[in-house]
Image (cartoon, helix red, strand yellow):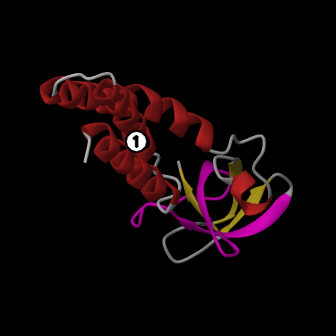
Amino acid sequence: MPAWVAWAIVSVLLAVGEIFTPGLFFLGPIAVAAVAATAAAAAGGPVWLQIVIFGAGSFAAVGLLRPIARAHLTMPRAIRTGAAALEGARAIVLQRVDDRGGRVKIGGEEWSARSYVPDEEFDVGTEVEVAQIQGATALVYR
């Protein structure tokens, strides 16, 4: 089997692997590096050159493309809706909040709340930030 065929098979397998691991964007850039090695093999390059191209291409693709892609895969705060849109929002404590419970006001709505950090407590009137929403409870921190 010619080397370029082997590299082509590797690149297809990596691309298929990327399809079945959504959200990671790890195998896709390596598949691009395998395509570059396929081109080097098809052009008649020696095996050591094919491996160097694959290694350098993998390193560059993962190091350069992955951070860019991951930045574009996260949902911006302006687009988030529902409870996800409340994460990072400011809240005012209406009833003392500790790791067992309490009440806060988030954007005009009253929510049950717990402290995000287990031993942290907040008195009435304290401004806190929503770390996470679990069901109908806001987890807050200072």
Q: Measured from the top left, where is residue 115 in percent x and y?
A: 52, 64
- Quarter where residue 39 is shown: top left
Three-letter code for the amino acid on which mark 1 is drawn: Ala
Q: Is residue 93 visible?
A: yes
Write down the quadrant of residue 139 in the picture: bottom right
Among all residues in the image, which is located at the extreme front? 1
- Residue in the image at 73% along x and 62% along y: 83
Outermost left residue: 48
Total residue callouts: 1
Span colored in magenta: 109-137
- Residue 89, position as x, y percentages in the image: 69, 47
Q: Is residue 53 above or below residue 8?
A: above
- Which residue is at a point 43% across and 50% down the rendered structure image? 12
- Looking at the picture, tell me which residue is in the foreground, 7 or 68: 7
> Label 1, on which residue?
31
**Relative to 136, is 87 above or below?**
above
Identify the element where label 1 is drawn.
Answer: helix
Q: Position of residue 117 (x, y in %)?
A: 43, 61
Name the quadrant containing residue 84.
bottom right
Asked whether residue 101 is drawn in magenta, I would say no
Residue 26 visible in the displayed image:
no
113 falls in the magenta region: yes
Work out whether residue 78 or residue 118 is closer to the camera in this orientation and state it: 78
Residue 91: image location, x then y, percent: 70, 51
Q: Residue at x 74, y 52 (%)?
A: 85
Q: Residues within 10 Å of mark 1 (few under 14, many from 20)?
A: many
Quick one: 1 or 26, which is closer to the camera? 1
Give left or right: position of 116 versus 101: left
The residue shown at (31%, 24%) is 40
